[in-house]
Image: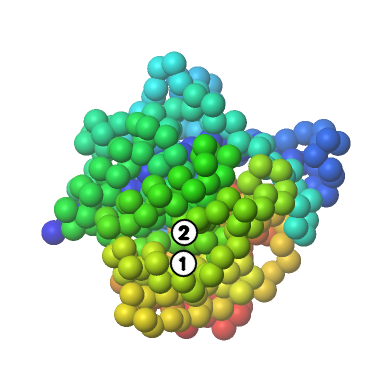
Amino acid sequence: MQKTYDLLSIGRSSIDLYSNDVGTPFVDITSFAAYVGGSPTNISVGARRLGLRSALLTGLGQDPVGDFILHFLNNEGVETRFIVRKPGRRSSAVVLGIEPPDRFPLVFYRDNCADIALTIDDVLAAPVTDARVVQFAGTNLSQEPSRSATMFAAELGRSAGAKVVLDIDFRPDQWHDPRAFGVAIRAVLRSVDVVIGTQDEINAAMLSDPAQMTITDSQMSDTRVRGDLDAAIAGLLAFGPTAVIEKRGEQGARIHLASGERTDAPGFPVEVYNILGAGDAFGAGFLYGYVKGWSWYKAARLGNACGAIVVTKHGCANFMPTLDEVLAFAEGYGGLE
């Protein structure tokens, strides 16, 4: 059955303020550049630039920040008519310092934010049954009513034949207890086909002791979670997904299938300028290949190439590559296969 949309992304959106003073400690920053962000929003923009028919379900405040985000998305060609403006709620914001190669202090402003107020009725008004892939972020599950709405969307999409993709997206300051994050993630996995996350995020999804977690830089931009990674991946797959995609930074990605097969897709060596958004760029590239029926390896390689391009840029959504750009980039390294 033909679907109107290749991808429906559900979850957070924000105005992202990135330091213009690269390499400067946060307290000495003098100016910021304004971009659009939020993991599902970044993925929807990246997928659209690659050529997918992309729609976004998020919540925005009735404020100038919401206008800013909506204006950008409309210019990008992302389907925005399912985005909900939430009276009494605020569009969220992120402030980021950039201190390469490994310090990127990040602060979220999400109190009373609009995207966490998405409801089941908002889901019913969106094209959940008219998308080939429904993708959402783990942060959606941190509060009601977004938690129930997201779980409902996953169930509804699955019942309509969509593939459901979870980006783990662990942001510990959004949870009253980091163990609650894993409880929520595991509860939704029966409706998920593919899980995407870093090694730390995968461990967080199976977290049993808060002492496993160390926040090394500001709130959550560099959260380390200790654990038995292989056991965590096996645990996630046991709940029903077909695959867990392990994002491994400069090493690329590793695909773990429920069948027991494991495949490594190498990364692309580049000089890192800003790591924030690289994972979302990977998600957009991987989902393009996934929608197109590519092999796991080729889809992950495209994701790696998109991520490698974005880590050389100042922001994320605003710097996502087109398909021609990413294929030309990959060709310089011998191609995707």
Cβ atoms under marks 2 and 1 closer than 8 Å: yes
Please, what is the three-letter code of the amino acid marked with disc 1?
A: Ala
Residue at 58% across, 69% down: 248
* Res 316 seen here: yes
* Res 317 seen here: no
Question: Which residue is the extreme one toward the top?
Answer: 88
**Image quarter hosting the N terminus:** bottom left
Q: Please tell me the numbered disc located at residue 206.
A: 2
Relative height, residue 159 to residue 299 (above, below): above
* Residue with the mark numbered 1: 232
Which sits in the foreground, 126 or 177? 177
- Characterize the local packing of mark 2: few (<14), some (14-19) or many (20 or more) Cα atoms within 10 angstroms: many
Residue at 60% across, 62% down: 226
Residue at 56% across, 78% down: 266
Please, what is the three-letter code of the amino acid marked with disc 2?
A: Met
- Disc 2 from disc 1: Cα separation: 6 Å
Q: Position of residue 6 (x, y in %)?
A: 30, 55
